[in-house]
Amino acid sequence: MLSGRADNQDKHLVAREHFVFSDSESQLYHFSVEGNLVRDGIKIPPEAGVGTVTCIAFKNDQIVQGDVDGMLNIWDLKARTSKNIHTGRGWIKKMRFAPGKGNLKMLILYSDGVDVVDLKK
């Protein structure tokens, strides 16, 4: 996401990026980089019931982790809440959010097919 700021007559664009990753113990990390500044975000301990994390998707204030057992762990950073949803489908290979600012639908790829999930519901 790019945001602009005007100083006198010069325009400066400052790039802002968010990085979300998980370690081998399924602890979740969130950092942001704005220009030359790295902000240490949050460190979230692993949620009970979440196995080895295979993929992560991040949009707005939602971080979703998928694991080898078909569990979705959904973190709402703004509300500081999480919930687990067992899909019953097994290993989650990839997840992607649909485009659009308020759109929280996501495509989930399994070994045997795909699902579309709406996180608003």
Image (spheres, rainbow, N blue to C red):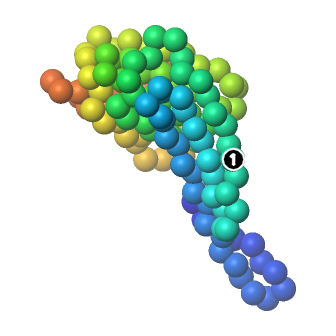
Q: Quadrant of the N terminus?
A: bottom right
Q: Tell me the quarter of the picture where residue 66 sits.
A: top left
Q: Residues within 10 Å of mark 1 (few under 14, many from 20)?
A: few
Residue 118 spot, x, y in % from top left? 43, 26
Residue 74 horizontal side relative to residue 16, left or right: left
Q: Is residue 90 above or below residue 34?
A: above
Residue 99 horizontal side relative to residue 9, left or right: left
Residue 3 spot, x, y in % from top left? 66, 65
Residue 17 spot, x, y in % from top left? 57, 57
Residue 32 horizontal side relative to residue 95, left or right: right
Q: Tell me the quarter of the picture where residue 10 sits.
A: bottom right
At horizontal 81% and vertical 81% (from top left) the residue drawn is: 7
Residue that mark 1 sits on: 40
Residue 72 visible to the viewer: yes
Q: Secondary structure at mark 1?
A: strand
Asked whether 82 or 60 is in front, the reply is 82
Q: Is residue 29 above or below residue 67?
A: below
Q: Is residue 90 above or below residue 2?
A: above
Residue 37 spot, x, y in % from top left? 70, 62
User: Which residue ends up furthest to the left in the rendered image?
Assistant: 112
At horizontal 26% and vertical 23% (from top left) the residue drawn is: 91
User: Which residue ends up furthest to the bottom in the rendered image?
Assistant: 9
At horizontal 54% and vertical 17% (from top left) the residue drawn is: 47
Dot 1 amino acid type: Asp
User: Which residue ends up furthest to the right in the rendered image?
Assistant: 8
Asked whether 7 or 40 is in front, the reply is 40
